[in-house]
Amino acid sequence: MNCVLATENEKLREEVKKWVQQAVNTQRDLDEAKRKRLELEKENDSLNTEAIQVRKKNKRLLRNIADLHEEMEAKKT
């Protein structure tokens, strides 16, 4: 009887070890996913800032083109 209980106990220990390892791995995966998400959010913020700067520059260039066009039209007349 003790031998059967010891075998069962050992099986349960092994099962618990597996569960603990799975939990540890899951936590690592979650931590890694959080780290990657934060990294991507920072990159996204940076890209958004860059996009805003590019749009401002484009507006400025379009105004310059419009001004040059007006000057050329004024010189024609």
Image: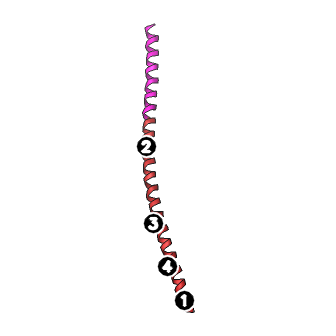
Amino acid type for the residue under numbered disc 3: Gln
Question: What label does residue 74 carry, if any?
Answer: 1
* Crowd around label 2: few <14 · some 14–19 · many ≥20 (10 Å): few
Q: Decide which of tag 2 and tag 3 comes sooner along the chain.
A: 2
Q: Position of residue 25 (x, y in %)?
A: 44, 35
**Residue 58 at x, y percent in the picture:** 50, 71
- Residue named by callout 3: 53
Which residue is pictured at 49% across the width and 79% down the height?
A: 64
Query: Is 45 colored magenta in this rendering?
Result: no
Magenta-drawn stretch, dominant element (helix, strand or loop)? helix
Residue 8 versus residue 34: which sits nearer the camera?
A: 34
Image position of 69 (left or right of 33):
right
Amino acid at the residue labelled 1: Ala
Residue 63, labelled with which disc? none
Calculate the distance from the C-alpha at mark 4 to the C-alpha at mark 3: 17 Å
Q: Amino acid at mark 4?
A: Asn
Please provide the residue range marked out in magenta.
Answer: 1-24
How far apart, in angstroms, are the residues tagged by discs 2 and 3? Answer: 32 Å
Give the number of the mark in front: 4 or 2: 4
Q: Is residue 16 above or below residue 75?
A: above
Residue that label 2 marks:
32
User: Residue at 54% across / 89% down in the picture?
Assistant: 74
Check whether the beta carbons of the residues at disc 1 and disc 2 lie within 8 A of each other: no
| Crowd tier of the residue under label 4, counting other residues whose Cα lies within 10 Å: few below 14, some 14–19, many 20 or above | few
21 in magenta? yes
Residue at point 46% right, 32% down?
Answer: 22
Question: Nearer the observer, disc 1 or disc 3?
Answer: 1
Q: CA distance from mark 4 to mark 2?
A: 48 Å
Instruction: Say which label, 4 or 2, has the lower sequence index.
Output: 2
Dot 4 or dot 3: first in sequence order is 3
